[in-house]
Amino acid sequence: MTETWRYCGNQIKLWRTEAGVSREELGKEANYEYETVKSMEQGRRKPSARLLQVADQMCGAQGKLLAALEFLKPEPFPARSQEYMAIEAEAIALHWYEPLLIPGLLQTEEYARALISESCPPLDDETVEERVGARLRRQEALSRRSSTMFSFVLHEAALRSMVGGGESMKRQLLRVLEAAELRNVSVQALPMGRCSGLALAGPLVLLETPDHEHYAFAEGQTTSALYAEHAKISELTQRHDMIRRHALCIEDSAEFIRKVADEL
């Protein structure tokens, strides 16, 4: 997004200079300090809708600066996961293992909001709202795409992570149980101490497209990787299968999750 800010800010500066409008004059009219306008023009701050509106009018841009507003909207997903999201949106099968967090497709709004709003560096409010909304819209696939198989394996640590506090976590676990009642969704729990070598190595997702292409997705703190190579997919599929074999069966998993929820 920084490049977009820089380009938009530069356009404001070019139009302002050509129109003979000083930075001080623009700031006064838009009710911004000189340094604030300078930061926006240099792309260090996101150019505001107010500044664009005033600059468009003062510089006679006839809507050309206002057109930038569409490109300043926050992305619904981080750039590094957008390709994965496109594949997830059309997958006919999805197998997700998560060691520490509830998968995004199963999160309540308050759980998702707690996670996204605690990002570091902090996200602005508009981006938080956009990403929370996008995550909730993704979840519609569980009920809308009834022919798609969704399977989830959740480590016990993810069930006890206390994101948002005890009451929030209890509602989150009940949401997981509710989703598990859908005929195309399965949820299994992996208790502490089982398959530790693989279970603690990080999350992974396996996907199959309508064209029967297979992908694997793995994510870390600041990096993620979408794999299409057969050898890598085979390796990650074997890992997922081993983890799943150590997980509780679906019925015992529901009882286990309910027990954790009752303890909160």
Image: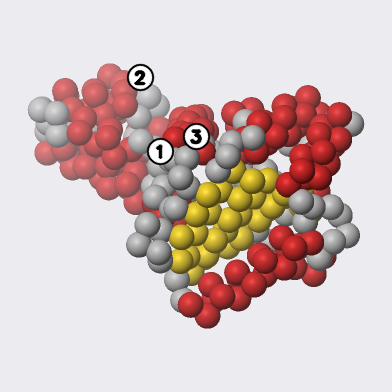
Distance (Cα) linking label 2 and label 3: 48 Å
Q: Secondary structure at mark 2?
A: loop
Q: What's the amino acid at mark 2?
A: Asn
Q: Is residue 5 above or below residue 73?
A: below
Q: Viewed as shown, does residue 171 lie left or right of 34?
A: right
> Which image quarter holds the C terminus?
top right
Q: Is residue 133 above or below residue 29?
A: below
Nearest to the eye among marks 2 and 3: give it: 3
* Residue occupying the point 64% across, 72% down: 238
Q: Is residue 238 above or below residue 82?
A: below
* Residue occupying the point 54% across, 61% down: 206
Q: Secondary structure at mark 3?
A: helix
Distance (Cα) linking label 1 and label 2: 24 Å
Distance (Cα) linking label 1 and label 3: 27 Å
Q: Quadrant of residue 97?
A: bottom right
Q: Secondary structure at mark 1?
A: loop
Q: What's the amino acid at mark 3?
A: Ser
Q: Which residue is mark 3?
A: 143
Q: Which residue is mark 1?
A: 74
Nearest to the eye among marks 1 and 3: give it: 3
